[in-house]
Image: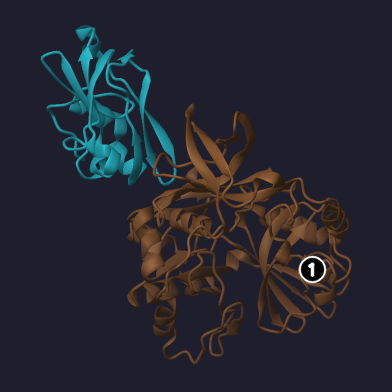
Chain colours: A cyan, B brown
Amino acid sequence: MNIPENLKYTTSHEWVSISDGIATIGITSHAQEELSELVYIELPEQGKQVAKGDPVAVVESVKAASDIYAPLGGEIIETNNVLADDPATVNRDPHGEGWMFRMKISNKSEAESLLDAGAYEGEIS
Amino acid sequence: MPDNALLHSPLHDEHLRLDGRLVDFAGWQMPVQYTGILEEHRAVRSGCGVFDISHMGQVFLSGENAASWLNGILTGNIPAMDEATAVYTFMLNENGGIIDDLITYRIGHESFLLVVNASMLEEDIAWLRKHLADGVLLEERSRELAAIAIQGADAERIARDMLTGTGCPMPARNTLEHFPDEAGTTYLCGTGYTGEPGFELICPADDGPKWFNKALQAGATPCGLGARDSLRLEMGFPLNGADLSPERSPLAAGLGFFVDLEKGPFIGREVLLKEKQDGLSEKLTGIEMSAKGPPPRPGYAILCGEETVGRFCSAGLSPSLGRGIGMAYLPVALSKIDTTLEIDIRGRGFAARVAKKPFYRHLR
């Protein structure tokens, strides 16, 4: 199971990497495997303010569309444009090239409720 | 339903060995995919795929009156069928609505095999029993039989390889061959649900793995129900429960070709005759998205101007076209090819148009 130790996780299968108040977010390797090959990804608009738990993106496989939730509150500052042309990047490299969006965190204490790798592994096993 | 209540196909161990992703389908645990739906879809369009279709229902009807009795139950002209041929046909309720769509095989002068949807098997059997005539024997044998579909541009080569040494000739389109040297019931049929050349093999459950593995050894790609669905949607083939329903007639579904109104009485005929005379109000219509974008899904609203004019039945991404396609019952006036429509996807409008079926045509 590919669950990098340096990332934080949500029970809804997003991963989060936080550095200097900026969070980079994607979906976990487990999530992309469950979803199977992605054919379309809808990302949030830059500048959008979101609250923790808001649906902010949609990933679609041949079979279904699934919501992606904001793991933290804040402002969307960047999205990964590569995914528009090649959504399967998320399948190939979910924790790297397949990142989905970056946000400026509004309340750092919210990050305390995120899961570490061990706790996430417990969630999905 | 807990997994242990689901039926296992005779090919279950093969699906586990091939790491198939198993899902609940009509009470069966069946593979939706092995490596990926897109890959499997493309394998069928460019090479050959093998599908486990053992979940399909098999109902045998025999007796001296079987042909004339079935003629009153189904929309096709059954007594006119030659032996060893197949027709696509419908079982209708008294209102002309579709109970099930099925393939009828005339396996002998007085014997028929109906291959029906797994989800409708119980209902079909109940309907057939309710109307059963003296001297017609009904045997439901779905659990005793395995079925696999060999489908694809390269299906004939694969099937020839599989048949080496059996002495069974290749069946032409919509015909079947009864294996001369097999114990039990083995049929090879020139039928399919993908729009590609192909065959469906029906055999005793214990022989299922042997034939499935012969197809794999000959070079066929194992394909799940996901690709089966995207392949049939590209051809505009309907799926019962999604595109067909007890409230809609085959005429409204655009499938009047498979209804013989002149052959004599059958259940639902009077309603269809009236529908034909009065004209349809709505028709199952092919719709194609105008550009790449989010795939349409069943239930999404279809707009013409500001007005919602219908909702998708089957819909999804066409892997071959790279854009969304689907079918919906639309007012007949809006069902003309190239009519401009808009699809509401999560509150945003996406351009679409009425498209001719099949959505996908092979460039051969």
* Residue B339 image position (x, y, % from top left): 59, 46
Q: Compared to B138, does A88 lie above or below? A: above
Quadrant location of the C terminus of chain A in the rendered image: top left
Q: Is residue B4 visible?
A: no
Residue depicted at 57% across the width and 58% down the height: B357
Say what secondary structure mark 1 lies in: loop
Name the subunit of mark 1.
Answer: B
Image quadrant occupied by the N terminus of chain A? top left
Q: Position of residue B287 (x, y in %)?
A: 55, 48
**Where is residue A58, by image quadrant?**
top left
Name the spot of residue B27 as percent of width and height, x first.
57, 50
The image quarter containing residue B190 is bottom right
**Residue B337 position within the rendered picture, expressed as x and y whole percent measured from the top left:** 59, 52
Q: Is residue B288 above or below residue B358?
A: above
Labels in figure, total: 1
Q: Residues within 10 Å of mark 1 (few under 14, many from 20)?
A: some
Give the residue number, with chain letter if any, for mark 1.
B260
In the depicted view, which residue is nearer to us: B35 or B265?
A: B265
Q: Residue at x 74, y 59 (%)?
A: B125
Q: Is residue A71 rendered to the left or right of residue B278?
A: left
Query: Disc 1 residue type?
Result: Asp
Drawn side of residue B272 relative to residue B322, left or right = right
| Front residue (pair B217, B276) | B276
Q: Nearer the viewer, residue A82 or B68?
A: A82
Residue at screen point 54% across, 60% down: B358
Q: Is residue B37 visible?
A: yes
